Image: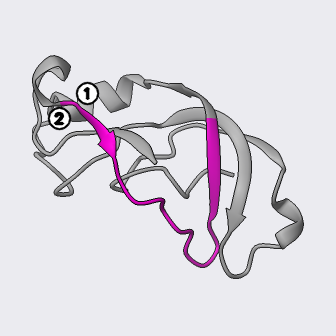
Amino acid sequence: MKAAWYEEQGPATRVLVVGEMPDPQPDRGEVRIRIFASGANPGDVKKRQDTFGVGMPFPRVIPHSDGAGTIDMVGEGIPASRIGERVWCFGAQSYRPSSLTTCF
């Protein structure tokens, strides 16, 4: 999959990288969403800039808190009938290295 990420904090033009990485797999109780629209939440920007002075919470962060798409894979404990369901998410990247499997 194509993704944008950072491995150090700072200005977007200096730290954001765009490239390919393995497709994420949902864990128990999670869904994976094929994202069709993504938004940069102010929290994404503040964390990348280290506005709160907490440093890098993970070695690599894939910023993306807000978006919409379709569930394309489910983890254990989630009914397969959810596949194909259109969903949106907000604040999904909080306290995680990415939001790739957290939206509902």
Location of residue 80 by image quarter: bottom right
Task: Name the kind of residue labelled 1 in the image.
Answer: Lys
Counting from the top left corner in percent of width and height, residue 65 is at: 48, 37
Packing grade of label 2 (10 A; few <14, some 14-19, many >=20) is few
Q: Quadrant of residue 49?
A: top left
SS of the residue at dot 1?
Answer: helix
59 with respect to 28 (left or right): left
Q: Residue furthest right?
A: 81
**Amino acid, disc 2:** Phe
Residue 15 within the segment the image draws in magenta: no
Query: Which numbered disc flags the more N-terminal residue, 1 or 2?
Result: 1
Instruction: Identify the residue position indicated by label 1 in the image.
Output: 46
**In-image side of 100 versus 103 (left or right):** left
Q: How far apart are the two marked residues, 1 and 2, measured between alpha carbons?
A: 7 Å
Which residues are drawn in magenta? 16-35
Q: Nearer the viewer, residue 92 or 7?
A: 7
Numbered disc 2: secondary structure:
loop
Residue 72 in percent (x, y) is at: 71, 56
For this view, does 14 lie left or right of residue 28?
left
Label disc, if present, on residue 52 of the rendered structure: 2
User: Going 75% across and 42% down the picture, which residue do you hit?
Assistant: 87
Q: Is residue 66 above or below residue 76?
A: above
**Residue occupying image coordinates x 16% and y 18%:** 13
52 lies above or below 57: above
